[in-house]
Image (cartoon, rainbow, N blue to C red):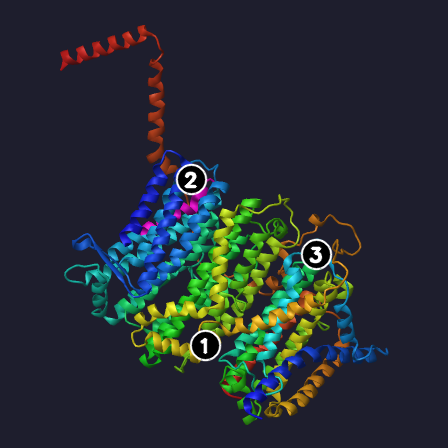
């Protein structure tokens, strides 16, 4: 089955790139990716039900082992869902918004399936050699997609920074893999051999390798202070690609982090603490920097940094507790489950929100929230979906973001006493709670500046095409369903976690949830329903009942908004997004002046021109000269033949 | 009476108190303030009369309003009702007794703020946007204070659910850290209730009602009720942490809680006329002091004072 998925993705790429019609090539590519994603989803669900799939291709040192164990299957399931949605969304989105970009459609049709396939490959391969290959393929294909609008200087800059940072991560990964492989005999890149090689290493070297690996994954996840590429690259890409980058690609590095730290390296408190601290920093900086952004996609990109921080916080705390003592394994596995749950939810609502921004860009061709506004009237369905997205992002009770964030808080707070380490986790939870407040602040800004109030651009009425909005609606439904029935998601997540931490079975975890997280699950009566939802199901009708039971006999009167008695053109007095939280930004301005490391972009273009481009230009000019002899007169051709004949004769005589 | 029945009755009693009392307290507040101004002032029931009258008024809706404007007050009221059901107001435990319900309550209270501001922002009126942004900026810092105060209380009693906290509080003496944290919660309640000098979101003379400018009729009534309820819930938690012994009996708890909260509101009423309105930046800067104090409360509770 796995080879069919990869074959389908490859076929999609080839047909997309080489079919005679650009437009149809793009469509075929998207449809084939859709089928491949659905197949991936199907296979992963089968694997989660207890039939792991293993596959070995090629032989010798470059043997390519693919394995879909429980952890890969869980990630594949999330990937499958989001890929399906994004394939369907790309179908119309790229055609409507980006048709006038030359060969763009073809490049998109070529790279999108390759990008998806390489991300799946990263989580399925079980050999260091092929891991590096898949990783590089992922970096390259995503780089090409990021610089889709390569005519814009800022997009090129962002793309190059992204490319440089991807390769910094790849370099560290190569160092780790090669060091481990050099200690195997006979030489083997299989994860199992790497694992035994790691265990035979000197502890200090082993620790260094684990730290290098964590940093590599940190670069790719965009945790602070290695995050600077993320808020540039993610917004620069077209929105469907941003959805994949923010929703899925950063998760591949989290998969590797979890897989390597539990299965290849041995658990170490230091590594767990490093992950935890990076997570806390990401939450604070990501959420704080999202507040003053005026570009809605940059805002979402910073928000991704914050939410990746939540996941790293949970995983780091879990790994740390597990490494501290095996008897706390239950807490550790609950924390890791919480992290994975949040990972899944984040994949859903962040992809959703990036795609919603895509709708906005299609409609208005701007991302600047100073100009945007009032789109709720023109795009009612989009604004409704966006509302669900931001409520999940904030994590209001009954939305999925709440279930997973709350689980992180609770398992973090109730973690067992371990000297000063517990205090670190508690501090992390406190700051994560504050991060939740900041999340609410920037989410409200995102929604209100785009969909409510007044706009400075005039937009035509009418929502974007249903082919674009319906896939988004599916994700929005997923956000609500996993918020109302978190137990359903948890019962899936416990399977991979119990394979990572063998001391704890799925049953123990389920019992643990009943004990620690009774709010999420009512044990006996309604096995999967969250208590929150049950209670709100009672109170919301009461609150709305007050509103509608007392309906006034007179009809509701609609009036112009009251503007102090003056008559303004309502479009002229929009409150700009940049000054929405000006007071707060001034208050914490020292924090915004922190200098994070960054890389400068310098173009090697002049030299590259000399070597790569100008010979071809000269050749073209020469051929243009040659063309002059084709004038259409027989006498000239006879003359040319005559001259050639003389040359041949002379050559013959001389030679 | 068995424990279950007492718990159920006290939960219902708690919700009823949360809905019925806050407007009454606002009436007392207005009366005392009027007396300090040397006015006669409205009757104590005046706020309730206002709400009941608004309930039967015709709705006027701005043409720029979005759906969030229409539904936000009801949803925030629902979240607050849920919070009222989870916070032990008259008895040391409620029916909904879960691990870590403290964090759920923090979320429910801020959910109410989120929806109220979304409602204001959805009205399409620029004064409402100004009011909502002030409310949100204040909310960032008060939320930080609330979070750290709750954490200080949780560390003090080494528990993360209300029933354990109040059960232990009834057994032991109050500590400095939990009292400081409670006082901070009360200060946050004062600020979130839009009282002078923090009356920024509504600032009648300046931005003409701000966040409520476009609301009218039933929606205005629910909006006002939500603000009152949110304030009341924070105060109720704080005073119950300071004086938890009366919570052993729902009837005693009811009476004593009413008295305790009355004292707080009377202090509020005497406090408020002393101030003029802060400018936005001044208000935010002064809130930093509260944040710092809340961190001190956490440190005190870690030391064990």
Pinpoint residue A63: horizontal percent, then vertical percent. Answer: 20, 55
Q: Is residue A644 left or right of residue B105?
A: left
Q: In 3D space, how far apart are the residues under numbered discs 3 and 1 (Cα atoms)?
A: 43 Å
Residue under the point 58% across and 63% down: A441
User: Any mark on residue A517, and which?
Assistant: 1
Q: Are marks 2 and 1 in contact (CB under 8 Å)?
A: no
Compared with A576, A14 (above or below) is above
Q: Quadrant of the N terminus of chain A?
A: bottom left
Q: Do the residues indicated by labels 3 and 1 lie within the same chain of the protein?
A: no
Q: Is residue A144 magenta?
A: yes
> Given the image, what chain letter belongs to the residue carrying mark 3?
B
Query: Residue most toward the top?
Result: A635
- Identify the residue under disc 2: A105
Q: Do the residues indicated by labels 2 and 1 lie within the same chain of the protein?
A: yes
> Given the image, what chain letter belongs to the residue carrying mark 1?
A
In the image shown, does A340 or B176 lie closer to the viewer?
A340
Pinpoint residue A65: horizontal percent, then vertical percent. Answer: 23, 57
- Which contiguous range is marked in magenta? A136-151
> Given the image, what chain letter belongs to the residue carrying mark 2?
A
Earlier sequence position, callout 2 versus callout 1: 2
- Identify the residue under disc 3: B126
Q: Is residue A338 left or right of residue A368?
A: left
């Amino acid at each position: 089955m796995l080879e069919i998925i990869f074959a389908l993705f490859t076929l999609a790429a080839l047909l997309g790139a080489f079919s005679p019609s650009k437009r149809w090539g793009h469509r075929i590519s998207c449809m084939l990716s859709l089928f491949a994603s659905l197949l991936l989803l199907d296979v992963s669900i089968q694997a989660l039900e207890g039939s792991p799939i293993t596959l070995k291709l090629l032989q010798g040192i470059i043997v390519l082992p693919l394995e879909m164990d429980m952890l890969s299957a869980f990630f594949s399931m999330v990937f499958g869902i989001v890929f399906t949605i994004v394939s369907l969304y790309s179908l119309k989105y790229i055609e409507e918004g980006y048709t006038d970009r030359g060969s763009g459609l073809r490049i998109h049709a070529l790279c999108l399936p390759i990008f998806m396939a390489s991300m799946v490959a990263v989580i399925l391969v079980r050999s260091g050699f092929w891991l590096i290959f898949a990783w590089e393929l992922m970096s390259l294909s995503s780089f090409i997609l990021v610089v889709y609008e390569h005519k814009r200087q800022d997009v090129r800059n962002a793309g190059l920074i992204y490319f440089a940072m991807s390769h910094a991560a790849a370099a560290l990964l190569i160092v780790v893999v090669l060091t481990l492989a050099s200690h195997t005999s006979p030489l083997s890149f299989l994860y199992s051999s790497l694992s035994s090689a790691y265990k035979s290493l000197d502890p200090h070297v082993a620790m260094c390798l684990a730290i290098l690996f964590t940093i590599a994954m940190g670069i790719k996840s965009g945790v602070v202070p290695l995050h600077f590429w993320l808020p540039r690259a993610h917004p620069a890409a077209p929105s469907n690609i941003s959805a994949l980058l923010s929703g899925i690609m950063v998760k591949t590095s989290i998969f590797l982090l979890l897989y390597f730290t539990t299965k290849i390296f041995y658990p170490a408190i230091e590594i767990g603490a490093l992950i935890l601290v990076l997570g806390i920093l990401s939450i604070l900086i990501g959420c704080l920097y999202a507040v003053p952004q005026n570009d809605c996609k940059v805002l979402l990109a910073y928000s991704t940094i914050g939410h990746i921080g939540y996941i790293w916080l949970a995983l780091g705390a879990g790994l740390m507790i597990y490494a501290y003592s095996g008897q706390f394994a239950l807490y550790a596995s609950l924390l890791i489950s919480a992290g994975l749950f949040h990972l899944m939810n984040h994949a859903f609502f962040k992809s959703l929100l990036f795609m919603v921004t895509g709708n906005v860009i299609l409609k208005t061709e701007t991302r600047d929230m100073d100009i945007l506004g009032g789109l709720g009237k023109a795009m009612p369905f989009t604004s409704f979906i966006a509302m669900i997205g931001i409520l999940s992002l904030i994590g209001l009770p009954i939305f999925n973001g709440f279930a997973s964030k709350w689980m992180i808080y609770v398992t973090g707070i109730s973690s067992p006493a371990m000297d000063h380490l517990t205090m670190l986790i508690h501090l992390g939870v406190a700051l994560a709670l504050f991060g939740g407040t900041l999340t609410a602040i920037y989410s409200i800004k995102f929604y209100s500046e785009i969909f409510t109030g007044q706009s400075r651009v005039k937009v035509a009425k009418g929502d974007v095409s249903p082919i674009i909005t319906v896939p988004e609606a599916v994700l929005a439904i997923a956000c609500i369903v996993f918020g109302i029935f978190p137990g359903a998601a948890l019962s899936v997540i416990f399977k991979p976690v119990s394979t990572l931490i063998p001391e704890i079975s799925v049953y123990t975890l389920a019992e643990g949830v009943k004990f620690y997280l009774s709010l999420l699950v009512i044990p006996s009566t309604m096995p999967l329903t969250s208590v929150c939802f049950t209670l709100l199901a009672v109170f919301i009708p009461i609150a709305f009942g007050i509103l509608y039971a007392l309906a006034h006999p007179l009809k509701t009167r609609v009036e112009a908004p009251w503007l102090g008695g003056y008559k303004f053109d309502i479009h002229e007095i929009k409150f700009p997004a940049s000054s929405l939280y000006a007071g707060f930004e001034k208050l914490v301005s020292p924090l915004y002046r922190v200098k994070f490391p960054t890389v400068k972009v310098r173009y090697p273009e002049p030299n590259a021109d000399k070597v790569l481009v100008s010979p071809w230009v000269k050749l073209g000019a020469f051929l243009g000269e040659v063309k002059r002899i084709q004038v259409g007169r027989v006498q000239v051709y006879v003359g040319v033949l005559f001259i050639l004949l003389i040359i041949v004769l002379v050559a013959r005589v001389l030679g | 009476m068995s424990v279950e029945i007492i718990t159920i009755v006290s939960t219902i009693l708690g919700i009823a108190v949360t809905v019925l009392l806050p407007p009454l307290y606002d009436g007392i507040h207005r009366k005392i303030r009027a007396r300090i101004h040397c006015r006669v002032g409205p009757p104590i029931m005046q706020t309730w009369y206002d709400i009941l009258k608004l309930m039967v008024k015709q709705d006027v809706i701005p043409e720029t309003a979005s759906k969030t404007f229409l539904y936000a007050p009801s949803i925030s009221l629902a979240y607050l009702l849920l919070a009222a059901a989870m916070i032990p107001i008259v008895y040391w435990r409620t029916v909904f007794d879960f691990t870590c319900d403290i964090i759920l309550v923090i979320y429910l209270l801020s959910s109410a703020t989120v929806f109220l501001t979304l409602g204001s922002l959805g009205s399409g009126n620029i004064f409402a946007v100004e009011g909502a942004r002030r409310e949100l900026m204040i909310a960032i810092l008060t939320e930080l204070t609330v979070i750290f105060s709750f954490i200080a209380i949780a560390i003090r009693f080494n528990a993360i659910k209300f029933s354990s906290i109040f059960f232990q509080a009834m057994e032991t003496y109050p500590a400095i850290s939990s009292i400081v944290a409670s006082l901070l919660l009360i200060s946050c309640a004062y600020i979130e209730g839009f009282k002078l000098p923090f009356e920024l979101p509504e600032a009648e003379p300046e931005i003409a009602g701000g966040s409520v400018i476009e609301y009218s009729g039933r929606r205005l009534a629910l909006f006002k009720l939500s603000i009152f309820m949110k304030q009341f819930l924070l105060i109720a938690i704080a005073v119950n942490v300071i004086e938890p012994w009366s919570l052993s009996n729902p009837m005693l708890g009811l009476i004593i809680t009413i008295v305790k909260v009355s004292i707080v509101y009377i202090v509020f009423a005497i406090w408020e006329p002393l101030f003029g309105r802060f400018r936005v930046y001044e208000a935010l800067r002064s809130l930093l002091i509260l944040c710092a104090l809340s961190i001190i409360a956490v440190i005190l509770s870690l030391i064990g004072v």
